[in-house]
Amino acid sequence: MELSTFEIWTNIVLIGIGTFFIRFSFVGIIGDRDIPDWILRHLRYTPVAVLPGLVAPLILWPAATQGEPDPSRLLAALVAFAVGYFSKNVLASIASGIITLLVMIYFLA
C-alpha cells in the first residue's frame, strides 16, 4: 500500500496534535495544582516502564540481523541487567552492556 505525500503529512500532523493534547491534558489543565502523592509515586516509575519497551525489540528482533535473535545482543542484555540489578548503577549497566555487545560481536563475527 503506497501512501501519498499528503497522506503521510496528514498523519504526522494529526499524530502531533494528538500528542500535544495528551500532554496538555496533564500539564496544561492540572499544571498549576499540587499533584497528589499517590500520583507522584506512580510517575516515578514511568521511565523504568518505558525504557524496556524501547530496548526489548532491539534485543529480540534487531534490524541488524534482519529480525533474527542474536546471541551477542541477548548476552549483552543479560549482562547489563545483572550489573544494573546488583550494582544499582545505571552507567555501569549501560557500559557493561555496550562492552559485552562489542566483545561478542568481535568474537562471533
Image (cartoon, rainbow, N blue to C red):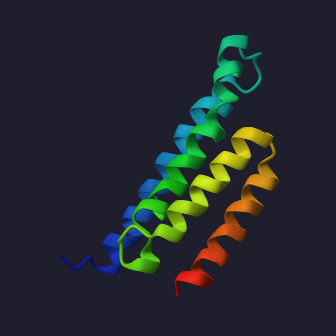
Q: Is residue 3 left or right of residue 9?
A: left
- Find residue 10 and report its horizontal and vertical position in percent: 38, 65
Q: Quadrant of the N terminus?
A: bottom left
The count of marks equals 0
Is 89 placed above or below 98 here? above
Examine the rendered structure and indicate whether residue 50 appears above or below residue 107: above
Tell me where residue 97 sits by quadrant. Answer: bottom right
Rendered location of residue 100, percent (x, y): 67, 68
Farthest residue to the left: give it: 1
Instruction: Between residue 59 and residue 106, name the one nearer to us.
Output: 106
Choose between 13 and 54: the one closer to the eye: 54
Q: Which residue is located at x 58 percent, y 53 percent?
A: 78
Q: Is residue 59 left or right of residue 26?
A: left
Q: Quadrant of residue 26?
A: top right
Q: Is residue 9 left or right of residue 90?
A: left
- Residue at 53% x, 82% y is 108
In the rendered image, the vertical position of residue 56 relative to residue 43, given as above or below: below
Q: Position of residue 46 (x, y in %)?
A: 62, 35
Check the image and name the residue furthest to the bottom.
109
Residues 13 and 84: in front is: 84
Q: Residue furthest front?
A: 107
Residue in the picture at 60% in, 75% down: 104
